[in-house]
Every structure is written in structure tokens, then in C-alpha cells.
Image (cartoon, grey):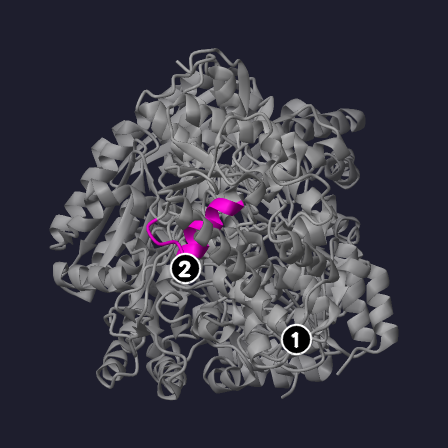
């Protein structure tokens, strides 16, 4: 369906001839993965241009979908009749305020860029677990939980003021931004509109476009640049900066792991705490798939049970010493055992930097077969999230035994948020996408996960999106789906914001 | 107007109060809002009561004003905006539902005060991140819903903390539970599974607790709240630093919080610290105030289960290095004021009379959010405005509370005055209204607007008002919830 | 190989976007963090490595017709390989190979750009990629006492390359190279007038048949000469002889060296001694086809192992830029007394392209100039007085951009700086 010429011309008037295309080659490349094609791709540069595009879509009864680097499938069109806003030209870091610990970015700044600029100033940010190749706008990710979340929280809670082009084309500047033109508070006057804009998860394109946002940043006790040497893909730091330490500890049981993670939280010693399984550790260090399989075998045989990776960063020699000793006590109390390959000086620095810069999520999820799926828990108390995800481990094992999934172990990965006040867990599956039986498994695991969450009372997981799934959870969960739908309808009266991964106003 | 018999069928007649004196009490408070008499006061006992009241109010379009704290009230939000409102007095709902040590969370009804909750959580080795010396009858839920600033910025990750989940009856009469409490399952089923109603965000793609916070009861009535708790330290070492240089103090504050060295951390001026500490009035107060430096920073270094002494002594060394670098001297006492005494005070509600009322009998607070950089200018602006109107700046209390782990700072000017003195009252009223615009121009964000200045604050941003009205149209389409407040 | 043979590679693309950036572990600041000139200039995802993977699949699925926009996207790429290297940090898949195969397919299907046709016509008729040049191929070597390998045997052949032969500004560099080798006692010869284009850029433009013709001609001449080593000062030629000829099993046992590799070796062996001071602050630009694309070709034949992880039998190694020629040019520069070398942000395997490659100089000189300007700005930001490189294509493009936009930056070849540092007589 070609755009009406009148609309195309109007869009061209907004962004300029170079910044809109409906050429087949352009639309085809944005629709890779077999998804429906957009009607046109636009490249706006300013909030005003975004607003104009949104208003035009409303007027001409089309939908729109905005994205930054666009890794997630939620950046795609759900069907015909959608205009793409590729926010690539909105790529500025607008403000870094060191004294007051916040930063303001546009959507196409990626986390690697932001972190690099912050590190120069003795600061750091939580990077979404998907990787530092993703947008640094805390509103761009599905959830925004990251490796640093144990000490650096995550998107929902790091969010300060923001600029939002609503689905019907208003511009709302939340918090202090609307009131006094400053970026450091996203709440008020009165109720906070952050409550509509996101929850554990984002609306993922279904509630307008976020064009600028501020987020909390954190202290960085390390060097202005990490001393990385080597040539791709074999990077490692020439030395581990003073005060930094990395360990991987496995435990005799999931329960011991959970307890130890809680104690690490209460002792406030973790900089990064991620309950990676051997499959993720092996994918992280390996520079190719063969190596990955070899490390997987080695690490699986080396651990006594599930474990976590912990990086500590001391703000002073005393702080470093305290953290080191406290950790050792916790390990001893919970029968933890170190994985020496991680602590080996040959490997430790490389692991450390890949986890701080979050560069290897791609290796972990995509290198094996180009596709991954699984179960994404919500965010709630650590033991609950852990228990929830463990329910799916036997199911994964069954599919592995049937040859439908990659045999990379069944331990999920868990992580601590805000020094153990919350946790998050996921179960990753990787498989050959050419195999129809394997493709079915993703759906079956999702169904099992939903059944478990509902019948087991484990909350609404992060992978719950779309009308059908919300309709499934809602009646058991304070009918949240009805309220979400009402907000959708109220803020998007023309259903212009493409909502496949959010909720529609259709009852 | 709701018929008496229908109300009595819900709460029983004994829980409906139309006595003149009581109606008078609820028709005004210590703020400068106009007095408006309610129709009656009802005291529900359960969520079902409240649900029924709200449904009934919808049928008759009767305004409802939820109140959970006991008097005195200060903000004007519990004074009806419209005549004939029903005050829904939740102060009798005093159940402490659950305290969970493992997950560091407590759940309680809206009538529970700080004095009641503190020992309950302490039994589990837990404590709340509290506001500074709340008044005795202040409801914990009320404080959380007002987004009151709390004294431990390290544990204040987000402006909504420490509020976790709420159960709320929206203006539509529907019950909803926010965050993890939404479900699936009943609370009991969630507990059996290991749930703790601690995750505030959600369910899924919205976080309605943020809409209920700061709403001044205009979205619904909360029937219980849960709040995240912190551990009671095994070891504490509090300090004071006095100085005349506010920017130096703020530099110290920035680093203490940035490096996560301290638990409690706030700045008071001499007037406020004297008001908190003084035992005998007015003698002690004057003496203390005159002996104290203009600004006093208070902070507390703490250790927990693991290597508490090593941790605390290391952090004291680190703290001292910062102090030396900025040119300040941390001490354990300044004159008669000891850090330990202030720590004890800050970990409890205020004694009686409420500390803000001790000086003159009344106090009007002007508070806002800002950032460190703006604070000195804001203090100057406030002083200039006060001088212009004839309010003695030396009498003004000032409280600066870093929040959101130092990203924001709550700034508060306390205008003490004699409520029986008309000209003093008038002066404070005028000052409180006219200073708003000049403070905003200098970087004050009135995130929690109350009273007579609400309109001038909230109407600055038409787009936010429009969005809030959309939210209101969903949660309270009949506008029965505390009408006349905010922009509703 | 054909485009279809890279289907499974292209299908591996998960759109993570690392092809657009320098390897994220190395990213030190926001400025100079882009690595792909094509998407940096044109902004649509389509222009990136990942976008081209999607385009390739769409072409195989016959979802795209040959139209102006498709060709514009296909040919607006310097074939610099930065996307390939960045991608392979994390993934086991080819990126540059299918991008090249897309061009080959375009040519096979009879769709290119007119200006490329005229360049190839020049190659076919005159053995040069520089269409319309008036100079004679061997003119640069006038006065140089050096063997003619068509008449005499020599152990080492110096291949000047089209860009040198037909650009008077580059003749001195080639002469210096030969002189330095002679000073070091190397038995060197040149083909002079008989030299013909290596064919490398023709391959990058998609003209596989023409490339192969050139390759066969060159190898025949080299075999006849008895030369064991071929040395060149052009990165494109280096890549052609070392990598492409090997890919098509034409290279045999010929050792291919870039002039900087050879010079570094000779300096280390003490056969060349830089003693004169050259007081200049420089920054070094890694040419794409010497650096990240300069590592040896890896022959592999096998098949994928069925299963849920992409592995092969026998195991397949990927060229990831790890073994490119990065240090020898730097070693040469560091051996020059008085010279100070300051690195840019984007270097070695993630160097920003000069802008001239892949036919862009011919098809889109504005884009070539834009790309060069970005690099010149980056060089200037180091405080260097000069940008030094090891490829005439890069040098020419930098000079053109400086001329057009004005800049105080000087452009040197590594060879000419070394030549300044070597006393007459070389020791």
C-alpha cells in the first residue's frame, strides 16, 4: 500500500527529501526477519519533526513506530499501514551534570558512547543487559535492567525528566522539565506521569515517541579509559585497575546461591552481580562458536552448581579491602566455590571489561544461531524471581533431550537489583530457526511460562506483551489489562501508535 | 449528598460523625486555604467499606476527601475543596499486616503511624527510611503517598521510595493493587509462592503507584501500603559539621552520598536544629541557636552484619579525607548539640508538641525540589523576599534534604509564626504566595504543590495539566475524589 | 561462490547494529565512534552492514527489482570492511563477502552504474582503472635504474599500481620505494610499461570476470620473471595479490609484501638505517586493505554441522582483522629519528576509511570527499601536523579533500618519510 502522495509530500516537507524514503530497497532492509514492511521510513532530527510526523499519521489514519538502533523485534511493524521513525539523527548527549549526577540524551546515543563520556568524568551509567550497542535512552529498552543493576538500578527507576511526543501529537515534558525547564526530576507537579509511560516494561513503541530523557548516573571509581589492548576479537586490559576484582562463585544449590546473593546485597559490596550460567560465561569469553562449546564443557564440569559473577569496585583501598573480605565470608558461609578460569589473570580483565561495557550479550544470544528466545521474568523480590524461572528448567531439559534446543545447560540467569532489594531472572533458549519444531518450542515455553506465572502466582513476567497475553493475565491480576487499555485509548484516540508489543484499545 | 442510612449500612452509624465541633475541625487546617465544611466524617474499617463508600459517592456525585493522619494538618489537601464532602477518615485502620525480614518489606493500613510501625519492623531487625521527625499522628501511608523526602539518601533510589505497593479504590469504585501486589493471586496466594508485594513498578507497562503518589487523594483511596525497609545497623557513628559556607557543605554532601558513605544525611540551619534539640523553651532554643553556626550538616556512618567495625572505621577515614579536601571538620558535637542525640531524634517521630510548632505555635512550610547548584541562589532569593516583606530571616528554619541518591535536593523553608497574631499570619501568607514565582525562576521545582499556590505552580505547564486530566478521566471520571485539588 | 552461498550468513544478522560502530570495547568517546561511512553519511539502516544483509536476502527472494535506488545503495559503499570486522567481534558470519557478491550479482545481471562501465572499459582496453589518463604506465620510473622483469629475472617485483602510475604526485613515492630497496641490496625489478592493473578494485566493484582476467595476466608475467616476492606500495594491490589471488587459487607460492612490511623487516635486519632527523608530528592512517583486510586468505571447504549452533566440519575460521598489517608501518615510522607518532581514535582494525575505495572515488566523489574530510578532522584533532598513510588511493583522496576544503594538514606516505631519514647511501 503506497502512501497517499499528499501524505508523502507532507512528510517530505517536514524532514526534507533526503530523510524520507519509500524505496523498495530501503523498506526491504528495515523489514528483515520476514516482518511486514513499513510504508515509509523517516529520519527526523528534532522533536518538532517527530511531532509533525505523528500528527500527520493521526490525520491520515496511519500508524507510526519509532526506534533507535532497533535490535528488538518491537521496533518492527506489526502489519501494513505503519510509518517508521528511525531516530538515528537524534543522537546528541545534551547535558552531563556531574555534581548533580544526571545526564540527558537523545534516542540514538548508544550506551557505549554514553559510558565512555561518563567514565572520562568519573561517572558511570547502568547499561541495558541487551548491550551497550543499544540506545542510552532509558525508555528505549524492553526493561532496561542491566549488569550494573545491583548498584546502579535500572531504567524504570533511573528515569528523571523526559520529553514525550504523545500518540496524538502533543509534547509533554514531564516533571521539572515542563515546570522550570530543568532535567533532573521526572515527577510532578502532583502525580507523576512516569506512571503512565512505563512499568516493569516499556510500551515498546505503543505509546508515542520519547525524544529526550534524563537519567541518574553513578560514581565510577575506575580510570577515565579502561586500558584495553589487543586486536579484535581478543581484547583485554593491560592491567586490572586498582580496587577492581572479579570472581565467579558456584554454589551447591539454587537456594544457597539465592541466600548468598541476598547477603551480598545486604553487605552492599557488589558493583556488578549477575547469576550467569556456564553457557553465558563460555559465550562471553569465546571468540567463535567452536571455542564456545569447548568452554561450555570446561565450565560446566568445573562448577558445583548454579553461580554468580561478581565484580567489586572499591572507592578507596579500605573500601576494597572490606568488600573483598566480606565477600569471602559470604562465600565461605554458603559453601561457594570459585571458578578459577574467570579469576585467571589471563582472563579476568577481559571478562571484567566485557561485563562493564556489556559488549558480549550479542555473543551470548545471537552467535550460536542468530536467534534466541526464552522466558523473561519480571522484577520482584529475588527469591521469587529465582523460583519462578527455575520452574522452566526441567521443561528446557526435556526439549534439549528431544534435540530441539541447544544443549547449553538449564540453569537460568538471575540478577540482583539495588543491592538485593529486587531480582530479575531469565531463561535463555537457542535453536536453529530453520527447524520448525524448534521454532514451536519458543511458543511452548512461553505458554508454559505464562501458565506457571498465573497458577503459581509469580507476577506478570517481562515477556508478557500484546493483547492476547494481557487478556490472559489481566483477570488474575487486578484486571490491569482493562486499565492499561483505557489509558491507551485515552492517550491514543486514533490508535496511531503501533501497539503489537503493548496493548490496543480493542476490548 | 449520600443519605445517612446508606452510609450507616456500610460503616454503621457509630462511625459517622456530624458533630459540629468535628466538622469544624476538618473544615480547616494550619494552611491558608479557605475553610470549607464537610458534610460528615466516616470511619471505615475495611477495604470493602471503602469500596462501597466510593461506589455510593459515584451514584450521588458526593465528593470524598481521604484523610489518614491525625491532626494537625498543614497542607490544605485534607480540607474539602467543595462543600458537602464526606471525609473518609482512615486513621482507625491500624493493622500492621506483615513484616518480612528476608525481603525487607512491611505492609500496613493507612492509620498506622510511625510510632506504631517502628517497633513492629524493629522486631525483625528492620527500619524505615523516614522523613525528618514526622509529627506523632502522621500516617506512614500518608507520608509515602505525599512523596515526603526521607533522611537516608543512599537508600532513596527513586523519588517514590520507600513506597512499594498499594491497594487502592479508584474514584470509579474499582479496587486495584499496584506493582507486584496486583497478582496473579490473592495476597495469601502470593505469600505462599514467596511474593512480598515489594516491587512497586507494574504490573506490566505502567506503574500506577506513581499516579497515586502526589495525587492528594484525587485518584482514589488507599487501603493499605507496603514499604521497603532497610536493615538496622549493627554499628553507627554519627557526625556533625558546622559551617557558614553552604556551597562547601554541599560539596561534602555530594561526595558523602556519591561514594555511598553515609546513611542519614541532611542539612539544617541553626534555627531548625535548635528547634529540634532544645529541651526548654524559649531559653534553650535561643541559646542553642545563637551558639550554632549558620549551617549544620548531619550524617551517620553505619556497619551491618559483615565486618561492621572494619567497614565503619574505613568509611570514617574516607569521609575524613573528603572533609580535609573541602576544608571542613567533622565532629561529634557542636557545643551542646551531640551527633548521637540528633541521630536518636532522627530515627523517631517528633515528640510533642510537634517540633515545628514549638517556637511560635504555627509554621508554614515552603518546599520544593532542586539541585545543589541552585541552592545558594534559592536561599538568597528567599531571604530577599522575606526581608522585603518584613519576615525576620534569622527566625526562618531551613532544611535541606538530598534525595534520590543525591540527584535531587529537597529544599524547605519553615516560616514560624504566631497564629494568634493577625499581622504575622498575614505576612507569612503573603510571603508564601509571592515567593513561589521568584523561587521557580531560580530553579525551584514545586513537585508537590499544595494550598493556595497550587494553581500558579501547576498551570505553568498546560501539556502536563492536559495529560493529568486524561489520567483523572480514567481513574475518577466523575471527579468525586477530592475535587478542587491540583488541577481537577 | 555466489550470493546464494552466503544466504545462511546473511540470515544470521540479528540487527544488533555493532556494524555501525567501532568495536564497543574500544570506544573511548562519543566523537569518532562511528565506523561505517555509508550509514554515517546516509543514515538509513539499509546502508549499514546489517542493512545490506537484509538487502541481500531480499534480492535472493526476488523481493527487489533493479532500480536506481537499489543501485545507489549497492554502490554507495567503500567496501572498507569495517562492518565485517565489527560484526565478527561477536558473530561467526561473513558480511563483506556477501556485500561483494551483491555487486557481482548486479554485474552478472547487467546492472551497474555507467561510470563504472567506463572505468572497466579502460581496464579492458588499456589495463588500467584510471580512465582517460594521458600518462604512460611506465613513465614514473624514468631515470630509475632498475631491472625490467619482462626482460630480466629478479627475485622481487615492485608493483607500482594504477594510482601511482597515472598520478604524477605519487611518482616520487614509488621511486623512493624502489631506491630504498636497492639501497638495502634487494634484487628488485619492475614491469614498467608492461605492468597491468592487479584487478582488485574491479573485483570490489563487482566485475569478477575482469578481475580474474587481470589476475591471470599478472601471474603469468610474474611466473615468467622468476620472482619469489611481490612488493607493492598500494593497499588495494596488496589485498588483490595477497588475498584475492589466493582466494581464487592463483597466487601459488608468491610471497606478497606491502612496502612497509618489507621496509620494517629491512630496518630490523639493519640493512636500512634511518639516521637523519625528520622533525614532524604525524598520525598514521591504516588503509583498509592493508590493515583489517590485509590478513591472509583462509581456504576452507566443508559443510555446516546440523544442529542448533553454527559450526562447520571441518571447523571454519573467520578472518576477523586480527592479523592485519598494523605494526610494520608504525615500526617504520617509529624508527625515524625526530618523528613523533600520535594515534587517532579510530585505528588498526577499526580505522575509518579514507573514502576512496569500492569505486566511490569514481561513482560518488562527493561521498569520497565527505568521508575523507571526517578523517582529516579526526587527524587534526590529534594535534598532528601531518597524516601519514601507506596507500596512494588514501593519499590522493586526502589531498583532494584538503585542497577542496582547506587545511594545514600535510599528507605523506610512510615511504617518503623514511626516505628523508635515510642518508644517501642508506647507512
Secondary structure of the residue carrying numbered label 1: loop
- B108 up-or-down from A391: above or below: above
Q: Is residue A210 magenta?
A: no
> Which chain is indicated by disc 2?
C
- Left or right of residue C359, residue A481 in this image: left
Q: CA distance from mark 1 to mark 2?
A: 48 Å
Q: Please provide percent x and percent y for residue C420.
A: 52, 17
Q: Few, some or many C-alpha atoms within 10 Å of disc 2 (few <14, some 14-19, many ≥20)?
A: some
Secondary structure of the residue carrying numbered label 2: helix
Q: Quadrant of residue B238?
A: top left
Q: Quadrant of residue B476?
A: bottom right
Of badges 1 and 2, the one in the foreground is 2
- B94 up-or-down from C215: above or below: below
Q: Please provide percent x and percent y for residue A365.
A: 38, 66
Q: Which residue is labeled 1 in the image? A: A498
Q: Residue at x 19, y 53 (%)?
A: A249
Q: Which residue is labeled 2 in the image? A: C247
Q: Which residues are magenta?
A: C236-253
Q: Please provide percent x and percent y for residue C87.
A: 45, 57
> Which chain is indicated by disc 1?
A
Q: Is residue C242 magenta?
A: yes
Amino acid at each position: 500500500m503506497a502512501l497517499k502522495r499528499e501524505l508523502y509530500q507532507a512528510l517530505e516537507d517536514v524532514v526534507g527529501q533526503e530523510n524520507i524514503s519509500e524505496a523498495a530497497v530501503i523498506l526491504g532492509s528495515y523489514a528483515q526477519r520476514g516482518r511486514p514492511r513499513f510504508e515509509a521510513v523517516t529520519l527526523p532530527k528534532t522533536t518538532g519533526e517527530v511531532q509533525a510526523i505523528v500528527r500527520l499519521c493521526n490525520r491520515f489514519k496511519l500508524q507510526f513506530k519509532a526506534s533507535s538502533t532497533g535490535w528488538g523485534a518491537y521496533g518492527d511493524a506489526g502489519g501494513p499501514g505503519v510509518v517508521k521513525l528511525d531516530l538515528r539523527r537524534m543522537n546528541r548527549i545534551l547535558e552531563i551534570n556531574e555534581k548533580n549526577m544526571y545526564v540527558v540524551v537523545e534516542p540514538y546515543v548508544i550506551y557505549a558512547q554514553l559510558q565512555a563520556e561518563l567514565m572520562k568524568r568519573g561517572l558511570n551509567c547502568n547499561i541495558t543487559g541487551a548491550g551497550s550497542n543499544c540506545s542510552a535512552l532509558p525508555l528505549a529498552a524492553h526493561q532496561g535492567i542491566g549488569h550494573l543493576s545491583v548498584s546502579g538500578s535500572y531504567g524504570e527507576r533511573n528515569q528523571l525528566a523526559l520529553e514525550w511526543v504523545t500518540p496524538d501529537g502533543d509534547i509533554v515534558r514531564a516533571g521539572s522539565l515542563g515546570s522550570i525547564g530543568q532535567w533532573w526530576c521526572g515527577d510532578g507537579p502532583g502525580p507523576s506521569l512516569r506512571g503512565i509511560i512505563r512499568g516493569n516494561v516499556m510500551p515498546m513503541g505503543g505509546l508515542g515517541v520519547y525524544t529526550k530523557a534524563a537519567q541518574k548516573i553513578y560514581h565510577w571509581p575506575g580510570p577515565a579509559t579502561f586500558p584495553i589492548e589487543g586486536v579484535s576479537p581478543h581484547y583485554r586490559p593491560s592491567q586490572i585497575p586498582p580496587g577492581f576484582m572479579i570472581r565467579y562463585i558456584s554454589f551447591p544449590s539454587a537456594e544457597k546461591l539465592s541466600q548468598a546473593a541476598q547477603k551480598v546485597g545486604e553487605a552492599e559490596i557488589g558493583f556488578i552481580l549477575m547469576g550467569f550460567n556456564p553457557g553465558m560465561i563460555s559465550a562471553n569469553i569465546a571468540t567463535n562458536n567452536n571455542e564456545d562449546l569447548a568452554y561450555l564443557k570446561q565450565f560446566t564440569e568445573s562448577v558445583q552448581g548454579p553461580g554468580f559473577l561478581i565484580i567489586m569496585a572499591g572507592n578507596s583501598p579500605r573500601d576494597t579491602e572490606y568488600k573483598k573480605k566480606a565477600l569471602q565470608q559470604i562465600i565461605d558461609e554458603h559453601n561457594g566455590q570459585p571458578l578459577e578460569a574467570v579469576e585467571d589473570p589471563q582472563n579476568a580483565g577481559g571478562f571484567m571489561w566485557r561485563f562493564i561495557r556489556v559488549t558480549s550479550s550479542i555473543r551470548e544470544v545471537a552467535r550460536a544461531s542468530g536467534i534466541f528466545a526464552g522466558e523473561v521474568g519480571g522484577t520482584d523480590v529475588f527469591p521469587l524471581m529465582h523460583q519462578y524461572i527455575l520452574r522452566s528448567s526441567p521443561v528446557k531439559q526435556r526439549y534439549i533431550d528431544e534435540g530441539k534446543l541447544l544443549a547449553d545447560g538449564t540453569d537460568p540467569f538471575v540478577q540482583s537489583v539495588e543491592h538485593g532489594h529486587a531480582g530479575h531472572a531469565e531463561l535463555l533458549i537457542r535453536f536453529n530457526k530453520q527447524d520448525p519444531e524448534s521454532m514451536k518450542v519458543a511458543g511452548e515455553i512461553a505458554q508454559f511460562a505464562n501458565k506457571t506465572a498465573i497458577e503459581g502466582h509469580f507476577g506478570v513476567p517481562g515477556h508478557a506483551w500484546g493483547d492476547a497475553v494481557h487478556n490472559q493475565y489481566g483477570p488474575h491480576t487486578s484486571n490491569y489489562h482493562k486499565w492499561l487499555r483505557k489509558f491507551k485509548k485515552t492517550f491514543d484516540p486514533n490508535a496511531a501508535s503501533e501497539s503489537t508489543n503493548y496493548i490496543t484499545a480493542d476490548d | 449528598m449520600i443519605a445517612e442510612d446508606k452510609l450507616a449500612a456500610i460503616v454503621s452509624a457509630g462511625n459517622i460523625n456530624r458533630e459540629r465541633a468535628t466538622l469544624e475541625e476538618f473544615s480547616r487546617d494550619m494552611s491558608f486555604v479557605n475553610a470549607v465544611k464537610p458534610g460528615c466524617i466516616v470511619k471505615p474499617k475495611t477495604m470493602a467499606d471503602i469500596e462501597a463508600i466510593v461506589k455510593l459517592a459515584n451514584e450521588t456525585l458526593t465528593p470524598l476527601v481521604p484523610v489518614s493522619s491525625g491532626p494537625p494538618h498543614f497542607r490544605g489537601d485534607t480540607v474539602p475543596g467543595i462543600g458537602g464532602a464526606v471525609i473518609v477518615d482512615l486513621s482507625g485502620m491500624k493493622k500492621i499486616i506483615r513484616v518480612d525480614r528476608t525481603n525487607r518489606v512491611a505492609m500496613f493500613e493507612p492509620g498506622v503511624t510511625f510510632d506504631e510501625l517502628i517497633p513492629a519492623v524493629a522486631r525483625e531487625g528492620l527500619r524505615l527510611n523516614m522523613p525528618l521527625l514526622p509529627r506523632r499522628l502522621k500516617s506512614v501511608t500518608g507520608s509515602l503517598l505525599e512523596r515526603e523526602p526521607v533522611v537516608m539518601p543512599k537508600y532513596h533510589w527513586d523519588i517514590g521510595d520507600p513506597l512499594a505497593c498499594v491497594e487502592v479504590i479508584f474514584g470509579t469504585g474499582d479496587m486495584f493493587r499496584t506493582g507486584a501486589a496486583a497478582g496473579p493471586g490473592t495476597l495469601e496466594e502470593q505469600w505462599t509462592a514467596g511474593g512480598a508485594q515489594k516491587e512497586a513498578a507494574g504490573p506490566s507497562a505502567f506503574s500506577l503507584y506513581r499516579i497515586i503518589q502526589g495525587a492528594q487523594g484525587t485518584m482514589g483511596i488507599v487501603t493499605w501500603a507496603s514499604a521497603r525497609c532497610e536493615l538496622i545497623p549493627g554499628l553507627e557513628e554519627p557526625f556533625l559539621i558546622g559551617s557558614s559556607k553552604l556551597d562547601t557543605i554541599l560539596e561534602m554532601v555530594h561526595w558523602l552520598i556519591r561514594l555511598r558513605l553515609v546513611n542519614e544525611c541532611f542539612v539544617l540551619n541553626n534555627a531548625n536544629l535548635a528547634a529540634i534539640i532544645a529541651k526548654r523553651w524559649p531559653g534553650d532554643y535561643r541559646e542553642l541557636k545563637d551558639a550554632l553556626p549558620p549551617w549544620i550538616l548531619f550524617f551517620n556512618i553505619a556497619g551491618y552484619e559483615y565486618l561492621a567495625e572494619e567497614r565503619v572505621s574505613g568509611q570514617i577515614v574516607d569521609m575524613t579525607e573528603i572533609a580535609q579536601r573541602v576544608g571542613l571538620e567533622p565532629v561529634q558535637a557542636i557545643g551542646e548539640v551531640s551527633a548521637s542525640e540528633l541521630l536518636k531524634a532522627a530515627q523517631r517521630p517528633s515528640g510533642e508538641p510537634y517540633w515545628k510548632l514549638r517556637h511560635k505555635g504555627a509554621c508554614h512550610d515552603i518546599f520544593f525540589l532542586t539541585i545543589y547548584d541552585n541552592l545558594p541562589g534559592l536561599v538568597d532569593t528567599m531571604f530577599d523576599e522575606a526581608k522585603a516583606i518584613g519576615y525576620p530571616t534569622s527566625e526562618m528554619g531551613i532544611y535541606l534534604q538530598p534525595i534520590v541518591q543525591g540527584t535531587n535536593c529537597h529544599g524547605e523553608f519553615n516560616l514560624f509564626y504566631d497564629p494568634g497574631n493577625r499581622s504575622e499570619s498575614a505576612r507569612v501568607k503573603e510571603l508564601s504566595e509571592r515567593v513561589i514565582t521568584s523561587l521557580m525562576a531560580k530553579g525551584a521545582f514545586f513537585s508537590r504543590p499544595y494550598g493556595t499556590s497550587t494553581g500558579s505552580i501547576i498551570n505553568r505547564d498546560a501539556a502536563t495539566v492536559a495529560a493529568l486530566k486524561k489520567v483523572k478521566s480514567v481513574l475518577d471520571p466523575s471527579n468525586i475524589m477530592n475535587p478542587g485539588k491540583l488541577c481537577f | 561462490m555466489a550470493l546464494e552461498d552466503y544466504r545462511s550468513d546473511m540470515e544470521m544478522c540479528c540487527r544488533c547494529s555493532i556494524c555501525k560502530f567501532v568495536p564497543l570495547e574500544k570506544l573511548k568517546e562519543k566523537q569518532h565512534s562511528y565506523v561505517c561511512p555509508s550509514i554515517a553519511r546516509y543514515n538509513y539502516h539499509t546502508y549499514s552492514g546489517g542493512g545490506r544483509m537484509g538487502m541481500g536476502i531480499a534480492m535472493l527472494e526476488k523481493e527487489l527489482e533493479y532500480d536506481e535506488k537499489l543501485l545507489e545503495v549497492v554502490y554507495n559503499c567503500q567496501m572498507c570492511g569495517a562492518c565485517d570486522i565489527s560484526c565478527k567481534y561477536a558473530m561467526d558470519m561473513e558480511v563483506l563477502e556477501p556485500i561483494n557478491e551483491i555487486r557481482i550479482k548486479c554485474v552478472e545481471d547487467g546492472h551497474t552504474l555507467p561510470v563504472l562501465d567506463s572505468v572497466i572499459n579502460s581496464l579492458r582496453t588499456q589495463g588500467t582503472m584510471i580512465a582517460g589518463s594521458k600518462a604512460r604506465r611506465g613513465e614514473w620510473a624514468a631515470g630509475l635504474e632498475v631491472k625490467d622483469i619482462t626482460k630480466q629475472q629478479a627475485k622481487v617485483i615492485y608493483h607500482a599500481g594504477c594510482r601511482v602510475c597515472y598520478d604524477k604526485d605519487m611518482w616520487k613515492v614509488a621511486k623512493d620505494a624502489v631506491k630504498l630497496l636497492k639501497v638495502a641490496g634487494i634484487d628488485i625489478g619492475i614491469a614498467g610499461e608492461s605492468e597491468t592493473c592487479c584487478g582488485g578494485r574491479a573485483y570490489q566493484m563487482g566485475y569478477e570476470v575482469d578481475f580474474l582476467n587481470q589476475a591471470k595476466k599478472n601471474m603469468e608475467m610474474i611466473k615468467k620473471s622468476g620472482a619469489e616476492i611481490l612488493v607493492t606500495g598500494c593497499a588495494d594491490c596488496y589485498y588483490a595479490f595477497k588475498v584475492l589471488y589466493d582466494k581464487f587459487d592463483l597466487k601459488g607460492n608468491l610471497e606478497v609484501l606491502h612496502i612497509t612490511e618489507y621496509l620494517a623487516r629491512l630496518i630490523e635486519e639493519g640493512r636500512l638505517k634511518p639516521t637523519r632527523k625528520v622533525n614532524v608530528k604525524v598520525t598514521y592512517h591504516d588503509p583498509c586493505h592493508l590493515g583489517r583486510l590485509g590478513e591472509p586468505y583462509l581456504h576452507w571447504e566443508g559443510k555446516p554441522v546440523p544442529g542448533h549452533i553454527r559450526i562447520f566440519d571441518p571447523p571454519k575460521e573467520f578472518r576477523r582483522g586480527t592479523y592485519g598489517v598494523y605494526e610494520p608501518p608504525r615500526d617504520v615510522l617509529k624508527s625515524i629519528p625526530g618523528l613523533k607518532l600520535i594515534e587517532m581514535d579510530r585505528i588498526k582494525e577499526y580505522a575509518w576509511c579514507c573514502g576512496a575505495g569500492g569505486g566511490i572515488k569514481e561513482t560518488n566523489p562527493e561521498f569520497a570527499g565527505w568521508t575523507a574530510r571526517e578523517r582529516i578532522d579526526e587527524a587534526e584533532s590529534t594535534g598532528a601536523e601531518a597524516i601519514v598513510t601507506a596507500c596512494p588511493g588514501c593519499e590522493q583522496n586526502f589531498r583532494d579533500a584538503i585542497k577542496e576544503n582547506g587545511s594545514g594538514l600535510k599528507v605523506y606516505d610512510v615511504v617518503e618519510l623514511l626516505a628523508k631519514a635515510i642518508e644517501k647511501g642508506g647507512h
